[in-house]
């Protein structure tokens, strides 16, 4: 919990702390269910962290908490401090391009025409 308190200095509300504390409970639950069970921060290995099933947001929050905890192995701490890259499937793919102003104008005009036609059909039917 000391790691959670150190991480929480930037949180601005009790709700943020509560949400992140419940996220930490998920880690504790999964650690206790692991085979063999992870009972101390010194047992959180890089391999266990990689196979742990937390989503990206949860992992990001908990990595910041775990790396501040006492007793975490140095290899695990270094792994958690290393920035992650985008998943391999997205590397090399061009980023999405936004519509130009002219395209947005045409899209909005077509949407307005569709809504107007529907509104006229409804008005004629009443």
Image (cartoon, helix red, strand yellow):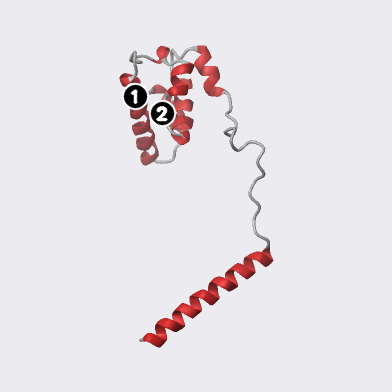
Q: Measuring 33% from the left and 15% from the top, which residue is drawn there? A: 37
- Viewer-side residue, 58 vs 121: 121
Circles 1 and 2: CB distance less than 8 Å? yes
SS under mark 2: loop
Specify whether 25 is left or right of 58: left
In the figure, 80 relative to 40: above or below?
Answer: below
When asked about the image quadrant of residue 32, the answer is top left
In the figure, 55 relative to 35: above or below?
Answer: below
Q: Residues within 10 Å of mark 2 (few under 14, many from 20)?
A: few
- Earlier in the chain: of badge 1 and badge 2, it is 1
Q: Residue 77: horizontal and vertical position, in percent?
A: 51, 18
SS under mark 1: helix
Q: Residue 120: horizontal and vertical position, in percent?
A: 46, 83
Q: Measuring 48% from the left and 27% from the top, which residue is drawn there? A: 64
| Image quarter of the C terminus | bottom left
Residue beneath disc 2: 53
Q: Residue 33: horizontal and vertical position, in percent?
A: 31, 21
Specify whether 101 is left or right of 51: right
Residue beneath disc 1: 30
Specify whether 13 is left or right of 76: left
């Amino acid at each position: 919990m000391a790691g959670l308190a150190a991480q929480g200095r930037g949180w601005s509300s009790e709700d943020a702390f509560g949400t992140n504390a419940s996220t930490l409970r998920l880690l504790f639950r999964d650690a206790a269910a692991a085979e063999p069970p992870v009972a101390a921060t010194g047992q959180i290995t890089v391999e266990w962290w990689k196979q742990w099933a937390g989503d990206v947001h949860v992992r990001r929050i908990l990595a910041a908490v775990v790396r501040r905890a006492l007793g975490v192995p140095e290899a695990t701490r270094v792994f958690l401090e290393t920035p992650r890259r985008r998943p391999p499937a997205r590397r090399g793919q061009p980023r999405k391009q936004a519509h130009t102003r002219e395209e947005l104008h045409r899209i909005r005009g077509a949407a307005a025409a569709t809504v107007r036609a529907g509104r006229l059909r409804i008005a004629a039917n009443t």
